[in-house]
Image (spheres, rainbow, N blue to C red):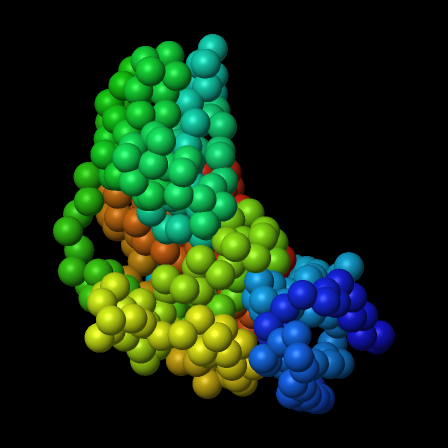
């Protein structure tokens, strides 16, 4: 296999190269200083299993993918599904209604990585409502402010009513109770399950550590296509163990927040670190969640509900992490809802 390195850009603070670890790997790290950049870090990991290469530019902290991507034929990629599933329940899949195509299509304004935005995209896909998707740049303040008065996402716009609203669960309630969008009340209410909520809280720090650097490192998510969007995300989203007040500050002279160069360096170091211990921890936690899953179609008994809308939207981001081993039922759940809601997973760009 040949290592392909390309898209080396001249304008950056630090360069990050990451390659998923499949089997035996070789690692080379170079730290260089120059007048044009404070930090340049290049980490190259050569896999003996498949041909792949990613060069990232951390001035925008972006990694350019190689011509070869992870495929389902590679048993050691993030698509790995292990037979650790609990007993399968024979539950019928959700019956998708006929396609709804309004003369004036509704528009959702979203960030691709945002789980609250994914909630709305999943719900609209499940209800089979054709819609336009407007991916906002992460640094775009003007567009959402013009729509709803502040920088938030998701935002739902219904041109035929000259209507705009925010808040993911309110948007879902709107489309699921309006007969113009097909049969109503198809999405069951949240069950109030405490076990899944507790599980989500227990993995929050772990997932932030793995996911946040990878969001901006892929170079593929639409909100991070330019350096400004990548820097806006890094500026506002802390990495563990730092808390938000320490990372962002509070606008006062006493607490101005962390210097941007330090934040860039921390993101690069997070990508350069060996993810194996964290991924192994995550794999074990996914086995726990698999036991909580009712079936490969619904996480809770009764049918497709807001439980699924929330859980699947959060789990989707895990597919950006290479080397994750999914228990079979949970893997089927991810694939089934991806197809049902017409929202793709990140497996093919996993780092």
263 lies above or below 215: below
The spot of residue 346 in percent (x, y) is 55, 56
Question: Would you say residue 329 is visible in this rendering?
Answer: no
Number of marks present in the image shown? 0
Between 16 and 337, the one lying in front of the other is 16
Viewer-proximal residue, 161 or 176?
A: 161
Q: Position of residue 194 (x, y in %)?
A: 16, 60
| The N terminus sits in image quarter | bottom right
| Residue appearing at x 62%, y 76% in the figure | 37
Q: Position of residue 58 (x, y in %)?
A: 58, 69
Instruction: Tell me if residue 334 comes above or below residue 340 in the rendering.
Output: below
- Is 265 located above or below residue 62 in the figure? below
Which quadrant: the C terminus? bottom right
Q: Nearer the viewer, residue 237 or 258?
A: 258
Q: Nearer the viewer, residue 60 or 199?
A: 60
Q: Residue at x 46, y 19 (%)?
A: 105
Q: Residue at 77% across / 59% down in the picture? A: 67
Is 319 on the left or on the right of 14, as rendered? left
Measured as percent of width and height from the top left, residue 320 is found at 52, 62
> Residue 289 appears in which quarter of the rendering?
bottom left
Question: Could you tell me if residue 281 is visible in this image?
Answer: yes
Please tell me which residue is depicted at 40% across the width and 51% down the height of the picture.
Answer: 114
Q: Is residue 123 left or right of residue 140?
A: left
């Amino acid at each position: 296999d040949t290592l392909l390195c390309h898209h080396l850009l001249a304008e950056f603070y630090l360069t990050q190269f990451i390659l998923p670890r499949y089997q035996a790997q070789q690692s080379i790290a170079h730290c260089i200083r120059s007048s044009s950049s404070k930090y340049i870090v290049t980490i190259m990991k050569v896999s003996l299993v498949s041909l792949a290469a990613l060069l990232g530019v951390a001035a925008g902290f972006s990694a350019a993918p190689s011509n070869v991507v992870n495929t389902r034929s590679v048993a050691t990629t993030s698509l790995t599904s292990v037979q650790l599933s609990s007993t399968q329940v024979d539950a019928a899949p959700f019956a998708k209604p006929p396609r709804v195509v309004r003369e004036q299509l509704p528009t959702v304004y979203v960030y691709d990585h945002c789980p609250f935005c994914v909630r709305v995209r999943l719900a609209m896909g499940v209800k089979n409502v054709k819609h336009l998707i407007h991916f906002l740049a992460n640094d775009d303040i003007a567009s959402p402010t013009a729509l709803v008065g502040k920088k938030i996402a998701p935002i739902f716009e219904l041109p035929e009513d000259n209507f705009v609203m925010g808040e993911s669960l309110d948007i879902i309630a709107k489309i699921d109770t309006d007969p113009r969008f097909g049969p109503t009340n198809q999405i069951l209410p949240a069950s109030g399950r405490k076990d899944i909520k507790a599980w989500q809280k227990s993995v929050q720090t772990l997932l932030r550590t793995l996911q946040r650097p990878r969001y901006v490192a892929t170079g593929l998510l639409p909100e991070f296509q330019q350096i400004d969007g990548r820097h806006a995300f890094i500026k506002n989203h802390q990495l563990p163990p730092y808390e938000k007040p320490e990372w962002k500050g509070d606008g006062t002279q006493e607490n101005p927040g962390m210097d941007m160069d330090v934040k860039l360096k921390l993101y690069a170091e997070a990508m350069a670190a060996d993810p194996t211990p964290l991924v192994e921890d995550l794999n074990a936690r996914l086995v726990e969640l698999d036991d909580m899953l009712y079936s490969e179609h619904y996480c809770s008994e009764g049918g497709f509900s807001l439980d699924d809308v929330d859980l699947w939207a959060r789990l989707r981001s895990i597919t950006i992490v290479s080397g994750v081993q999914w228990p079979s039922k949970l893997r089927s759940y991810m694939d089934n809802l991806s197809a049902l809601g017409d929202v793709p997973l990140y497996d093919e760009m996993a780092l």
